[in-house]
Image (cartoon, coloured by chain):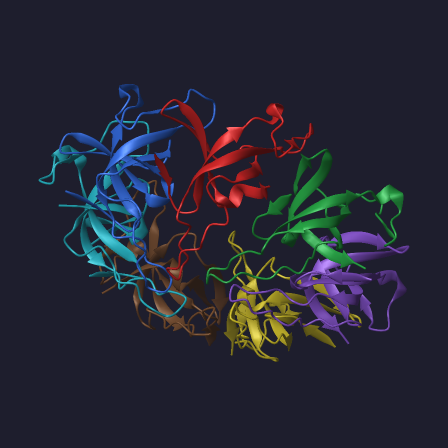
Chain colours: A red, B green, C purple, D yellow, E blue, F brown, G cyan
Amino acid sequence: MLKPLGDRIVIELVEAEEKTASGIVLPDSAKEKPQQGKVIAVGSGRVTEHGERIAMEVAEGNIIVFSKYSGTELKYEGKEYLILRENDVLAIVG
Amino acid sequence: MLKPLGDRIVIELVEAEEKTASGIVLPDSAKEKPQQGKVIAVGSGRVTEHGERIAMEVAEGNIIVFSKYSGTELKYEGKEYLILRENDVLAIVG
Amino acid sequence: MLKPLGDRIVIELVEAEEKTASGIVLPDSAKEKPQQGKVIAVGSGRVTEHGERIAMEVAEGNIIVFSKYSGTELKYEGKEYLILRENDVLAIVG
Amino acid sequence: MLKPLGDRIVIELVEAEEKTASGIVLPDSAKEKPQQGKVIAVGSGRVTEHGERIAMEVAEGNIIVFSKYSGTELKYEGKEYLILRENDVLAIVG
Amino acid sequence: MLKPLGDRIVIELVEAEEKTASGIVLPDSAKEKPQQGKVIAVGSGRVTEHGERIAMEVAEGNIIVFSKYSGTELKYEGKEYLILRENDVLAIVG
Amino acid sequence: MLKPLGDRIVIELVEAEEKTASGIVLPDSAKEKPQQGKVIAVGSGRVTEHGERIAMEVAEGNIIVFSKYSGTELKYEGKEYLILRENDVLAIVG
Amino acid sequence: MLKPLGDRIVIELVEAEEKTASGIVLPDSAKEKPQQGKVIAVGSGRVTEHGERIAMEVAEGNIIVFSKYSGTELKYEGKEYLILRENDVLAIVG
């Protein structure tokens, strides 16, 4: 199991070519393209300067869209994941 | 459906050439040109260091003007959208 | 109508050559030159980390001096405007 | 009249060559040289994240020393002024 | 003994080639690759602007994944360690 | 008299060659060398976002060590001074 | 005596070649190498935006590890010292 820290989440990539149930197809443009993933694990939220932990908006199982080039790849028990900060999540699809 | 996170909004572009009802025509200048869009979905607002969520000024259905080059494009169920932060919205038209 | 967001204002440029009633003539120098405008619309003010909205110092109808190169141009119903943040306003003339 | 916004002040330059009553003569060095001016108008002070307005330390009539290259020049009713932020004021002379 | 300051931790590197019990194998990619380590010592947490100390999420003995190139290497009593900030820790494995 | 603003101080340089009573001799190294000075005048302290004025640690008459290249030179009634922020003061000697 | 300001400390370098009692030997690597020193004097701590002084974690007499290239060298009464901010201290040894 991977337990992300603070406001980080662990996602599995959902390939755009597979045309998912949620129907997102990424545009073919020169702009920075968003990608989508499925949320596998969610951190407990960042802690503010006041010592308060801010609840996460993203939940396990959500399909999310995020900015390409954000996050860090890692392989765990043979599968590939990406670790993002919630701030890199643009929208929840569903 | 796309549910934007934090202070993000999802908009549909309103082409300047179509000369919309709201009457905005973008100037032909060397400065960074604003563009307009229609708000499709609105996040629940950013959360401050004090754990307070700040209400959004922009609402679904608003026609807005935003700085060109802000936001991230995405295609969803065959239509193109742009995801912006409310801070990239310059004004509401209407 | 244009409703600027947060601490933004919408102004009409007041050309320096016209030598306005308020009497400002911009210096001919290598430094970044200020410009003046008339305030057409005022945002409701920025919201602090504490969720408080800070009242605007600038009001509709004010003649203001601002730093050249600040703001974003836009044309609305055939007239040209500039959208600035209140922080780009240097002084109120009058 | 010029009413500077926030923590800005309007000053008239006091030429160093004139050797003022306050006796400052600017050094001839490679370092960034300070300049002096007389305060003509003072803003009402910056507003903090808590919505509090911070009182200005500088008052109308003060002779001040400020860092060269700070501020914005402007001509008003035939006279040249400089608009600075209070933070660019190094010291009050007197 | 090494007592890290603030939100720092001391870790022992866990070589990816050894294929650990926790099963992480780092991907062979052009992106910045995460690495894993075992936590040896944990600081008492950073102190906020309010003088509150924020509890650490990471504990001694945790296996963690962190961004490559973060931290500072040091050798202590013949063994090599890395000192990281908790913020450089991506996830806890296990 | 020079009254420095906020957390600024006015100092007279104490030349390193003179080998002062306090005994500091600056090292001959490639690193940024500190210098020493005598405090002539002290600001009333910076004001925080909460409107509180933070008391100065440095007092008139102190011999201080500061980072070379900090501050602004000025000549006043024939003598040379340097205006620093308290934050550029490394230590008080004595 | 040297009294460091705010969250600064004065240290004496402990040469890595001497192989100290605490047993640290610095690695021979391309990464930025930490160094160690003995704490001679400690500031009274930084003051937060709330006017609270944050207690120092480092105490006089501690052996510390710090990032190379941090701090400012100075010679005082014939001995060489380094002035660091507590934030540049990685760990206390012992």
Residue D22 x, y percent position in the rendering:
54, 76
Instruction: Tell me: E92 left or right of B90.
Output: left
Q: Residue furthest left?
A: G21
- Front residue of B16 and F89: B16
Image: B4 above or below E52? above
Image: C17 above or below E17? below
Q: Residue at x 55, y 68 (%)?
A: D65
Q: Residue at x 60, y 29 (%)?
A: A20
**Which of the 4 quarters of the picture holds residue C52?**
bottom right
Question: Is residue G77 visible in this depiction of the protein?
Answer: no
Image: F51 above or below C69? below
What quarter of the picture does the C terminus of chain C occupy? bottom right
- Front residue of D6 and F49: F49
Residue D27 x, y percent position in the rendering:
52, 60
**Which of the 4 quarters of the picture holds residue E59?**
top left
Residue E45 x, y percent position in the rendering:
29, 52
Q: Residue at x 49, y 69 (%)?
A: F76
Q: How many marks?
A: 0
Question: Is residue E38 visible in this depiction of the protein?
Answer: yes
Instruction: Tell me: C3 left or right of F3.
Output: right
Residue C49 x, y percent position in the rendering:
52, 63
Instruction: Tell me: G33 left or right of F53.
Output: left
What quarter of the picture does the N terminus of chain C occupy? bottom right
- Front residue of B65 and G6: B65
